[in-house]
Amino acid sequence: MIKKFIDLVAIISRLCGISAALMILLSVLVVCQMVVVRYVLQESVIWQTELVTYLLIAATLIGSPYVLLTKGHVNVDLVPIYLKRRSRFYLALFASVSSWLFCLLMTWLGFEFWLEAWEGNWLSESVWEVRLWIPYAALPLGFAIISLQYLADILSLFTGLEMPFGINDADAAEMEE
C-alpha cells in the first residue's frame, strides 16, 4: 500500500515536471513572439510580459515536486557523509519533516490567498486585467504536490526504499577516504 502511494506520487511529480517544462517552452515562444511584434512590426505588446511572468512562477512552483523527486535541488552532503547511519537517518528525517511541515503551511496560506482572489474577483492592474485566481492557483497547487512528495520521501526513509541523503554506509566510507 505504501509503495503504491509512493509510486503514484512519483507519477504526479513527473507530470508536474512535464507541465513545468511545457510552461517554460511556452514562455520562450511568447517572448519570441513579443520581440517580433514589438521590434519588427513596431506594435505594442499588452499581455505577453504578464503571461511570461505568471508562467515562469507557475513553472517554478509546479515543477518543484519533480525537482524533489529527482533530488535535483542543491544539497550539501558534507555533514551526512561523516555521520553514522542512525544519525544520518535522523538528520534526513528532521530535514524532510521540517520541509514537509513548511510546505503544508504554505499550502494552507496559499489556498487562503487564492480563495481571497477568487471571492474578491481580483484582477491584475494591467491593461490585460487577468483574473488573479488563475495564476495564484499555482501557489497552493505546487505546495500541495510538493507536500505529497515530501510525505512519499518520508515514507521511503521509514520503509528503507530510500537511503538517507541517498548515501549508504559503503558510499560514506568511500567518500571519507
Image: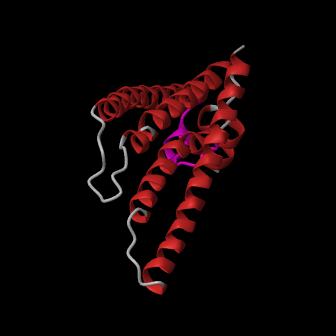
Picture coordinates of residue 86, whole percent (x, y): 57, 24
Q: Is residue 55 above or below residue 158?
A: below
Quadrant, the N terminus = top right
Picture coordinates of residue 41, whole percent (x, y): 47, 84
Question: Which residue does the image show at 65% across and 29% down from the upper left?
Answer: 9
Left or right for 101, reference 84: left
Question: Which residue does the image show at 49% across and 37% down from the upper left?
Answer: 142
Magenta stretch secondary structure, dominant: loop
Question: Which residue does the image show at 67% across and 30% down from the upper left?
Answer: 162
Left or right for 121, reference 137: left
Q: Is residue 24 above or below residue 36?
A: above
Nearest to the observer: residue 102 or residue 144: 144
| Residue 146 makes an appearance in the image | yes
Q: Which stretch did the figure color magenta?
A: 70-84
Left or right for 175, reference 107: right
Picture coordinates of residue 90, whole percent (x, y): 51, 25
Question: Which residue does the image show at 52% across and 42% down from the upper left?
Answer: 62
Nearest to the observer: residue 116 or residue 176: 116
| Residue 74 makes an appearance in the image | no
Residue 140 forms part of the magenta stretch: no
Q: Quadrant of residue 14?
A: top right
